[in-house]
Image (cartoon, helix red, strand yellow):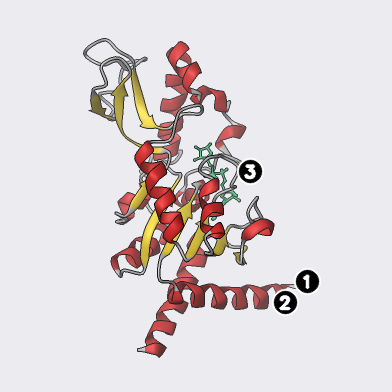
Amino acid sequence: MDEIDQATVIESRLKEAARQIHAARYLTAFTGAGISVESGIPPFRGEGGIWNRYDPSILDLAVFMRHPERSWPVIKEMFTSFLGTEDRTPVAPNAAHRVLARWEKEGRLKSLITQNIDGLHEAAGSRTLVEFHGHCRSLTCLTCGRALPLTADTTAADIPRCPCGGLLKPDFVFFGEGIPPAALADSNDVASRTDCMILVGTSGVVYPAAAVPLLAKRNGAVVIEINPGPTEYTRRMVDVFLPMKAGEAFERLDEMVLSIAESRA
Ligand code: APR
């Protein structure tokens, strides 16, 4: 397909996606690391992926419990590159995060389920957030259960410990750790109400998170996917595939949804 045809195909898919988004009664979004790539945060898999640089087992709960001296240095290094780009400038939400937050404020987006722990949806103003893999705002003591804010101070020690002496663990979900029960229940509820779900920047390979869009589809939702390349979902269940980066796609969709709304006003 030559470039002109490709552009024409994408334009018609954008129009269809905007029509579905405008018509939705219960529009939701399901996001992964790819939505934050344009903010300077690397994805986990694929080009420039974090798991090309670190062994994922470092975030396995059993490994962390047995060898915190191995896991913590990597967690800290990931955090600095994760939560601040290589030159340590703080990362900021991009157009995709901002449009989703504004659609929520306008009452268009009913809920946002994210696998991300980078805090960019919250920074953009999203509040109806389901944080499926937890977050990194705090630490929990594995002995006494006390919660402490995750700051440079509370993580200054090589192996951060609670005043009780217990091991402190960041409140994002490790491999082999259960999903926070409230997040699991909320995401199932959201998926059952959804009549249009936008999948953004996820490879769809990590369960049980990856099952959320499948549940929405099974309940009859129209599924729109925004990702530069095809994923586990694309051929199986996606109604409108937008082979685009998140920031550009949301800028275009926002314009188109607005013009539909204005033409109906
Ligand atoms: N815009 C949209 N999507 C993008 C962009 C972009 N600019 N850049 C990359 N992507 C896509 C990639 O093509 C890929 O499909 O984002 C996806 C990122 O996939 P992963 O790195 O696997 O991230 P994710 O699906 O969120 O991983 C799920 O795995 O390691 C665990 O807990 C971690 O929550 C994470 C989970």
Quarter that holds the N terminus = bottom right
Query: Does residue 66 lie above or below 23 as drawn?
Result: above
User: In the image, residue 200 lies at what x, y percent?
Assistant: 51, 56
Q: Earlier in the sequence, mark 2 or mark 3?
A: 2
Residue under label 2, please give it. Answer: 5
Res. 131 in view: no
The crowd level at tag 3 (other Cα within 10 Å; few <14, some 14-19, many 20+) is few
**Tag of residue 46:** 3
Q: Are marks 2 and 1 in contact (CB under 8 Å)?
A: yes
**How many residues crowd around disc 2 within 10 Å: few (fewer than 14), some, or many (20 or more)?**
few
Percent of width and height locating residue 153 = 25, 24
Residue at the disc numbered 1: 1
How far is disc 2 from disc 1 in space, using C-alphas? 6 Å
SS of the residue at dot 2?
A: helix
Closer to us: 77 or 217 = 217
Measured in 3D between alpha carbons, the distance from the residue under mark 1 to the one under mark 3, in whole angstroms, is 25 Å
**Mark 3 residue CB less than 8 A from any atom of ligand 1:** yes
Circle 1 sits in a helix, a strand or a loop, which is it?
A: loop
Residue at horizontal 23%, vertical 22%? Answer: 146
Q: Amino acid at mark 2?
A: Asp
